[in-house]
Structure formats: structure tokens, C-alpha cells
Amino acid sequence: MTCEEAAPLLDAFVDAELEGPTLIDVARHAASCKACDDTLQALIALHETLGRHGLADADSVDLSGLWNSLQPQLAQADARRAWRRRLRFTPAWAGALAVAASALFFLSPQTATPPPPAARLVRPDQAVIERIDSEGGRFELRRDRKIGTTLIMVSATGDDLP
Amino acid sequence: MASSDWELVQRSQAGDHEAFRELVERYQRKIAALALGMLRNREDASDVVQETFAKAYTNLDRFKGDSALYTWLYRIAFNLCVDHQRRDSRHTTVPLEVDERGGSPLPLPEGEPPRDDPFERTRDSEIRQQLDEAIRSLTPEHRAVILLREIEGLSYEEISHVLQVPKGTVMSRLHYARRQLQNRLRGAL
């Protein structure tokens, strides 16, 4: 192994990330190459310095109130989770029913009769019947074109008209 | 016997706060180390730790256990740190070498004997300050890769998962960041 081949592997060598054969090759090369061995020693020194001073820092972070501060946030998260679960476990048929009802509403023909258009007089001798009150009765409209007469016959009892 | 992360996650998903509290206690220091390394400010780091666990709890249903919990937590924390830096790009950082509360140096790592030699103490203090400046000079991406590898001890595969980049990118970023730190710490190492 040459220095060019070993150089990119030295970090992984120190980090014990190399596979067996490569590990042995790098170790053999470093044993016979002062430059690569110096690089390895420098990496180890950096590792030790970072380990010693970095860990001291972490202990200085005040975490004494951490759990008390977290509790209200956990309660909020619990409430949100409960809602999500409630929605998730709503019976499927309820959803299907809601969809069917919506579809029925939008797709069915309009059954309610629209209000009649307001009567409008087109001639002076015209009359408009707005309403006929007859409980169970019958009525007929007969028009005689020859004499120009319109006959409105109403039977309040429901009997046949003559 | 201590419960596994996955058991605690499942209990937390069912709303068991005590289980989640155990997870918080298990990982709060690790997240704090990453946040402090990224932001170089204790108060901001403390805020990010809190936001990380709040966000993790809110999104716990999405965690399926196909990766380690801590890499998932690191990912949340890293993204929050980046957001924090973007949001508050003008924020001032307090040098970590000196404790702003009392002006005394930061405590030594657990298990390390106090240095009686004033020369050693001064040298430690200088190295820490240089280190702080060197780390601050890195981009967030390079800083993250150094912290996750050197401080947290994650493998390349895990770092790749946390930062959502290929393993090759992790390697090249790590190589570049180390060279930058070595150049800035020349003479101190």
C-alpha cells in the first residue's frame, strides 16, 4: 500500500471502521511510513482532546427543571393524540353513510315543485284565479271557443260534475 | 432489570409518562452534549434538549423501532439546532471556557482528578478556549459530524442515519472537519 492509497483511509482506521484485510494493510503501511504514522498520532491526539474537553461541557448544561417543563407539553400531546385516535376509530359505516347522504342530496332530482310564476294580466278582460279552496272537491275548466266563454265548475263534495 | 428502549417507547406511546421520563433521563445528557457542541451556549442547549424530547413524544407514534432510539433523538436534536441557528443567526454565544455564573472554569469530566498544577490548569483552559473557537468555526454539518463521532462515539452508519446523508459524505465531512480542527489547534495538540 502506498501513502496515496493509505491517506483517505487513515480516519476510518482510527475510527475502527475498516474491514479486516484493509485494516491490516493500513496498519502495515503505517508501521513502515513515518508520515502516515504521524498523521495517525495527530488524529488520536485530536480525538483525546475532543473527548476530554467536550464531555466536560455537557455536564454544565442545567437540566434540573427539564422534566417539570416537559410535563405540560406531554399533556398537550396526549390530548392531540386522543383526538387523532378518536377520528381514526370512528366507525367506517358512519363515514360511508355521510358520503351516501351527500351524494343523494346532490344527485337526486328536485322533487319539490317550484312555486308557480306570478300570474300576469295580458288583456283588460282577463281574470286570474289565485286559489280555489275545496276540501276533497273537484273542479273542471271548460272553454267554449265558439261563444268565447270559459266555464269553471267546482264540486265542493267531490261528486262528479255534469 | 432495566427496560429496553423499545419497551419504554411502547409504554410511552400508550401514554405512560413514567416510561417516557426514564427515556428522558437515559438520553438527556447525550442530547445536551450534541446541542451544546452545536450551539456553544448552555441556555440554548437546554432549550433544545427540552424541545427535542417534546417533539419526540409528540411524534412517538412515527417511531417504528427500525433504528436505534438515540439516533432518532439525535436527528431531532440536530435539526432543531440547525433551525435554532437559522432563526437566531445574530445570537451571541458565551465562551464555554468560562462559566458565566461565577467566572470559574468548567468542571473537569467525571473521573478525572483535579489538576493541582497551576500550569496544567492554565494550559487546559487555553486548550478549551482554542477548541471552542475551532469548533465554532466549522459549518453546522461539519460540526455535527465531529460531535457525533468524537464526543458521542457513533459509527459512520449511525451518523449517516442521523444526518440523512450517505456514508461516503460522512467520511469526507469528518476528514475535512478534522483537518480544519488540526490546523486551528496546531501547537495545542
Image (tube, coloured by chain):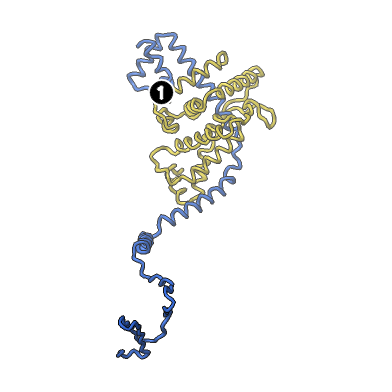
From the viewer's perspective, is B9 left or right of B97?
Answer: left
Q: Quadrant of residue B116?
A: top right
Give chain B's shade. Answer: yellow
Image coordinates of residue A94 in percent, x first then y, are: 38, 62
- Compare residues B122 and B85 and report the one nearer the observer: B85
Q: Chain of mark 1?
A: A
Q: Residue at x 57, y 24 (%)?
A: B136
Q: Amino acid at mark 1?
A: Ala
Give the chain coloured blue: A
Give the farthest residue toward the front.
Answer: A147
Residue that badge 1 annotates: A16
Image coordinates of residue B48 in percent, x first then y, are: 55, 37
Residue A67 visible, this angle: yes
Q: Residue at x 34, y 82 (%)?
A: A148
**How many residues crowd mark 1 within 10 Å: few (<14), some (14–19), many (20+)?**
few
- Compare residues B68 and B109 and report the one nearer the observer: B68
From the viewer's perspective, is A11 left or right of B44?
Answer: left
From the viewer's perspective, is B135 left or right of A94?
Answer: right
- Compare residues B187 and A125 and report the one nearer the observer: A125
Local secondary structure at mark 1: loop
